[in-house]
Amino acid sequence: MELNDLQAQRLAKLERLREAGHPGYPARTGRTHRVSEVLDNFDQLVEQGATLTLAGRILGGRRVMGKIAFAHMDDGSGSIQLWLSRGDAGEETFAHFRDDLDTFDIVEATGTLRLTQKGEKSLFVQSLKLLAKALNPPPEKWEGLKDVEERLRQRYLDLIVNDDRREIFRKRARIITVMRRFLDERDFVEVETPTLQPLYGGAAARPFTTFHNQLGQSLYMRIASELYLKRLIVGGFAGVYEIGKNFRNEGVDRSHNPEFTMMECYQAYADYEDIMRLVEDMLREIAQEVTGSTTVSYQGQQLDFGSSWARVPLAEAIAEKTGIDISRSTDLAALQAEIKAANLKVEFKTTWAKQVDELFSEYVQPALVQPTFVVDYPVELSPLAKRKDDQPTFTERFEAFVAGMEVGNAFSELNDPLDQEQRFLEQGRDYAAGDAEAHQMDSDYINALMYGMPPTGGLGIGIDRLAMVLTDQSTIREVILFPHMRQKE
RNA sequence: GGGCCGGUAGCUCAGCGGUAGAGCACCUGACUUUUAAUCAGAGGGUCGUGGGUUCGAUCCCCACCCGGCUCACCA
């Protein structure tokens, strides 16, 4: 290993300690309290005159004066000041701190609690022991680690230096905890379904492909858990959900990562309107618990999760923004003629459904800042959703939008096996025509539906994007601990 | 994939044909209540990689690698 000067200095200190008989990286600590416990019960512990042992990382710089020294220690629960006096700690301990220990070292400190003259809660140190030497030095004291590439490649360092960053991931964990509790309370059963699948389905996306050596079989990393979860509704569960990773072999940008976390849930004997109420209730509760309010500030805008969400039919939303009525321009040529007549700046697509989606993405989606359900999607875009009784070319489907981002997708699930088979066949024709994201025929899924699936409402929520909204982050990689980065040579 | 911008000390950044700089950090010395401690001094560089132009390249040119922003893609 090649070491720079700063690393070599630190290593020399470690070797000096080892020569003097210190273990270097001892296996355990004799700590008696966590920092947060000390801070919470400070007055009481001072009154008891307790001698206690804390452990943590030296942060915030060391300030060593002739016969007195200060530093801060962070153990993940909180941060407290260490205060050494040469007279009280003794020459040996003081010299150990001054000569052997560096910022970022992980140490154990034993002493009593005192307030400094400036009123800061401090551990008045009697003895110190190194628990783990940090051979790498800290980044700049005030600017910190700013380089985005280094922050993401060395996320551990990013987290050490920036407690705000740790807070984002605490909130992300809280989102999942509250979501799980919400679903458990409503008698959904948490399940696990295959991540390696012989057929991929449940979404329109290109998969990652892998191979099982012993079986000699290609497998796909799942792009959604949908079709397995619905098999479980056939199997008799009243409600199921799964929180897990999906993998989509697509581009990376501020709202897409190749692997991302999705919650999918399915409720028997419910429809998409029931699911809308479920989403409203769930996100209201999550927003309240995670941010302390049902009004969430995102990139300077106030998002209201306290009220019921606007419900806008897709066709109406497009008509409002573009003047084009997609329920009247029902084929590609007619729709594109309308687009030309209206002089709209959108790309021309190869199918009517894709053209509708293009209009929506371009003219409607960016304006959907407040939580909104866009409802009733064309059947061509929704091969797993049930048709509307009164409008069979549209489906009982909604997508949930917040801050211009799609955070959820839901429908009254298609449970007619014959219709489902036709939809798969149509998707197969699209695939043959070059649409790499079209669904594949899944005859086992059809077989499951042939045993009868109750009317069912289903939902997918993108956890990463929800975390972006609730932690006010503009890019998905700031809510993913280790986002995808290209390998360095 | 396209366009624009960037990669210089551990970190944050300046320099842009002629001896490679600052701040912080680190090291040495002084200092018994610091909070960006203070004061004095010292050390630290394959200027992303590989070619080219030039008497001379961190600087100009070409290619490549890795990023950032943005557009496209992601129904």
Image (cartoon, grey):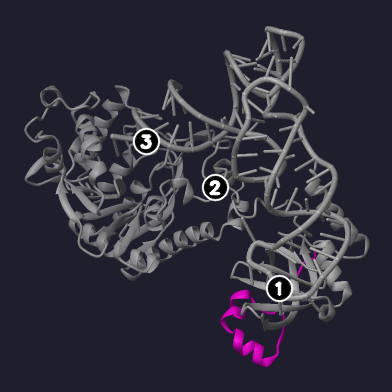
Q: Is residue A416 left or right of residue A47?
A: left
Question: Circle 3 is placed at which residue position?
Answer: A205
Question: In the image, residue A179 lies at what x, y percent?
Answer: 37, 63
Of the two numbered discs 1 and 2 in the rendering, the one whose residue sits closer to the viewer: 1
Circle nearer the N terminus (1, 2): 1
Of the two numbered discs 3 and 2 in the rendering, the one whose residue sits closer to the viewer: 2
Classify mark 3: residues with Cα within 10 Å, few (<14), some (14-19) or many (20+): some
Q: Secondary structure at mark 1?
A: strand
Q: Nearer the viewer, residue A280 or A92?
A: A92
Q: Is residue A5 left or right of residue A36?
A: right
- Asked if A184 appears above or below A435 in the picture, the reply is below
Of the two numbered discs 3 and 1 in the rendering, the one whose residue sits closer to the viewer: 1
| Magenta-colored span | A26-52
Q: Residue at x 36, y 51 (%)?
A: A299
Q: CA distance from mark 1 to mark 2?
A: 33 Å
Classify mark 2: residues with Cα within 10 Å, few (<14), some (14-19) or many (20+): few
Q: Secondary structure at mark 2?
A: loop
Q: Nearer the viewer, residue A87 or A394?
A: A87
Question: Circle 2 is placed at which residue position?
Answer: A482
